[in-house]
Amino acid sequence: MRRTGAAEGSALVESAIVLPVFVLLVLCAIQLALLGRARLLVEYAAYRAARAGILWNGDPRRMQAEAIRALASTACPTRIPSARPLCALYPADGGRSALQALSADPHLGFPGVHVHILSPHWPSHRHLFDLGGEELDFDRFGPEPERLDATLLTIQLQYWFELKIPFADAIVWNAWAAAQRLGGRGGHEIYRGDYEPISERALRAMREHGAGRSARAFFIPVVAHHTMRMQSNFYARFIRDCSCFQGSGCGAACRAW
């Protein structure tokens, strides 16, 4: 009887240790699966945003709206106070109003969905704009070798995806943050300039606890790029003397690099 009792006690202790670890692993697996689904949707949203851009003169507001439509189903539930009540409208709008609220701070570029125009690039292509320097003809192929490149719309779609699974959210976020500190942010070069997919200001906003952010809200940026040939004239005002963090284009001074 003593041996049986000791064995039962040992089994209970082992179960008390193993069961929480197993549950945590399951939660982490679910969270990573949701993150993987979000990555697939972001690629699709970048395609839809670029398609809207080539038809609407490169208007970043229309591109952002199209991306929000594609990603609306991932917005709810949320811990952000400004967007949480809007999740009650999910049966009617599929989460679109909640994701619009999450994307309402264009200055920080965090959280939510934000579109950055990478090409046309104003310092490199400004001499190609016609009609008083206001439009770039999409169907005019002149002797300039840059014109073919300038009529390609290249965008970056940045979606700060909220980790929603309890306990697993903090583990996944801390693992991602540790990878960033160890040099996980791979730099690139575009138009002879350094290009970082995630802006420093957005990273700082993520790390700091702003007035509208709950202490238990964790976000990871999911980034996708897409390129399409313009099917309408590109308007210079979307990339000249404006800020991509104000929802009206992406000037050279405010890009992600």
Image: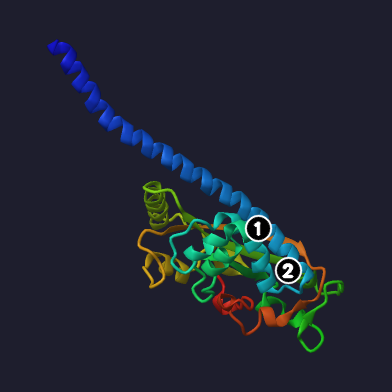
Give the mark toward the camera: 1 or 2: 1
- Image location of residue 62, percent across then percent down: 69, 71
Q: As drawn, is 143 to the left or to the right of 149?
A: right
Q: Nearer the viewer, residue 146 or 114?
A: 114
In the depicted structure, whether residue 19 falls above or below residue 160: above
* Label 2: element kind: helix
What amino acid is labelled 2 in the image?
Answer: Gly
The amino acid at mark 1 is Ala
Quadrant the N terminus occupies: top left
x, y (%) of residue 214? 38, 64
- Looking at the image, residue 130 sits to the left or right of residue 122; the answer is right
Task: Give the side of residue 82 with respect to residue 56, left or right.
Answer: left
Q: Decide which of 135, 149 is in the foreground and name it.
A: 135
**Residue bearing the label numbered 1:** 70
Q: Which mark is residue 53?
A: 2
Residue at 79%, 89% (x, y): give it.
132
